[in-house]
DNA sequence: TCGGGTATCGATGTATACAATCAGAATGCA
DNA sequence: TGCATTCTGATTGTATACATCGATACCCGA
């Protein structure tokens, strides 16, 4: 009840959407659990109308599901669903990389990506990676992927990638769990960095096919890692584990 | 004002969504034109709340765009946007075909697809294709693509394909225009049928890579045809032309 | 005791009233 | 005459009241 009066600049609807997404993604609600409007009103502190708008948006976003009889529930994902989502994202990013390479980008356009790579390099150099460094990595990695998508200069594709990434990039609290499930995180991060570097190189040299291939490979690796992590902890709640994708 | 009391079974929100989508897609509103809530209320006959819900859904669907200062406008698409969307859809469908092939589908699962092919064959056999036959073709073709997506058995992918197809398959009135822009429609339809047949064959024989490749090729052909059609009629309104994709 | 029907309660879907904000026009001043 | 400012009108954003629908629990009869 503290930050109730904060930030009049954003609409109530947006605030409600952010609050509810945070709640869902952080695991505050279980998969399949019903979320009542009244509950949402209490959580967000805004009235039913904007809450309703937020719920509709979250449904379209893929985090919620409509209950035929009325209302919304947190969408439940199977392990297969998540693995497919990773491959899906990889396929879309592959297309983005191809577009970027074939349409020709100036080296000035690639600068932000390279800078991103350098920053990640600095983090990954540490021997046992700290939780904080891993956290930074997740953010930087997400930025790299966003920048790559934008390099395609294709609004429809960017939009679609954004959609496909909604879940993977959502969880800020889940990654700790994912990391703890994966002691050899650093090794994986290093391989991921290699992929990133290859993509940038391929785009710079206008090799569309190679750029596409490496992004798909990148995703396949992430899927493999997630599969391994899940095998170790069979009852791991899947939603937080999604964050692992970001380490792929 | 006649069908105001019809069909109590579907919610006002859904009815409003359908009515507004029809309005947009049929070209009743120009690209970039603002759509006021009051206007939407008059068109749909329901009150502002469900209209608002419908507008939010249509925005998430990609047909509308939020105006920063408030309200919605019909999203404007460039020619490039549309061509990219076609390739995007082809890429996703390629993945779906690969999944279907690699996960192994029974020949019973392929039955509906084959039946769909046969029905299309019947239509395409006519020498000059009538408007009615072309109309049926568009519907059948859409069904084929939906069936193919479902064959992947991957809800996230199906959802994404559905999204990517929202525009292409939307326009029932635009295809006439598209067809008139393309006298050699029959030839294109025949090639498309060939592609369809090859995909089904590849899936049946578990050739994932081949299945994927042909769907991408299928989309590339559609893009090429659209590009040609647009070159002939430079001032063609783009939204109706989207329907041409269905003929690809 | 068990099954069916009904009644009550709660939640959602819808409508509308109110408030805040934005755009545009008109007016005043330089 | 041109520009800035203010005022007004309309439109959106929000809140809340009302209606409707579904679920659950209870009661009655067999």
Image (cartoon, coloured by chain):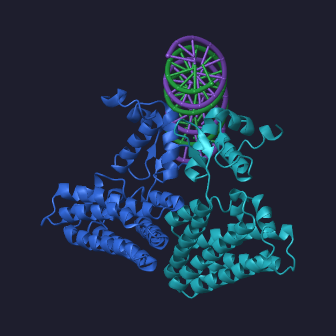
Chain colours: A blue, B cyan, C purple, D green
Total marks shown come to: 0
Is A193 drawn above or below residue C13 in the view shown?
A: below
Quadrant including the N terminus of chain B: top right
Q: From the viewer's perspective, tell me whether residue B108 is left or right of residue A120.
A: right
A175 vs A96: above or below: above
- Residue A159, percent across and down? 50, 57
User: In front here: B232 or B157?
Assistant: B232
Q: Is residue A245 visible?
A: yes
Where residue B62 sits in the image (x, y, percent)?
A: 58, 53
Estimate the x, y position of residue B135 in percent, counting from the top left. 80, 66
On the image, which quarter does residue B122 sit in? bottom right
Query: Where B12 sits versus A1, above or below?
Result: below
Residue A29 visible: no
Please give left or right for residue A87 compared with residue A180 in the image: right
Q: Residue at x 51, y 46 (%)?
A: A57
Q: Is residue B21 above or below residue A82?
A: above
Direction left: furthest residue: A127
Which of the 4 quarters of the picture holds residue C15? top right
């Amino acid at each position: 009840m503290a930050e109730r009066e904060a930030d009049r600049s954003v609409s109530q609807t947006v605030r409600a959407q952010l609050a509810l997404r945070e709640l869902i993604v952080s695991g505050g609600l279980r998969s399949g659990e019903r979320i009542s409007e009244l509950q949402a009103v209490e959580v967000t502190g805004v009235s039913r109308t904007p809450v309703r708008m937020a719920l509709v948006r979250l449904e379209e976003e893929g985090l919620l599901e409509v209950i035929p009889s009325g209302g919304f529930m947190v969408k439940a994902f199977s392990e297969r669903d998540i693995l497919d989502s990773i491959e899906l994202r990889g396929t879309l990013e592959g297309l983005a990389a191809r577009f970027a390479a074939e349409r020709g980008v100036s080296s000035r356009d690639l600068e932000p990506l390279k800078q991103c790579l350098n920053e990640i390099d600095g983090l990954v150099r540490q021997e046992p990676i700290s939780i904080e460094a891993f956290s930074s990595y997740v953010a930087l990695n997400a930025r790299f992927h966003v920048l790559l998508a934008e390099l395609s200069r294709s609004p429809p594709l960017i939009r679609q990638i954004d959609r496909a990434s909604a879940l993977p990039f959502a969880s800020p609290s889940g990654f700790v769990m994912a990391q703890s499930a994966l002691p050899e995180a650093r090794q994986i991060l290093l391989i991921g960095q290699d992929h990133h570097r290859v993509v940038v190189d391929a785009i710079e040299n206008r090799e569309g096919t190679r750029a596409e291939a490496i992004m798909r490979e990148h995703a396949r690796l992430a899927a493999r890692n997630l599969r391994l992590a899940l095998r170790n902890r069979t009852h791991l709640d899947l939603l937080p584990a999604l964050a692992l994708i970001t380490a792929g």
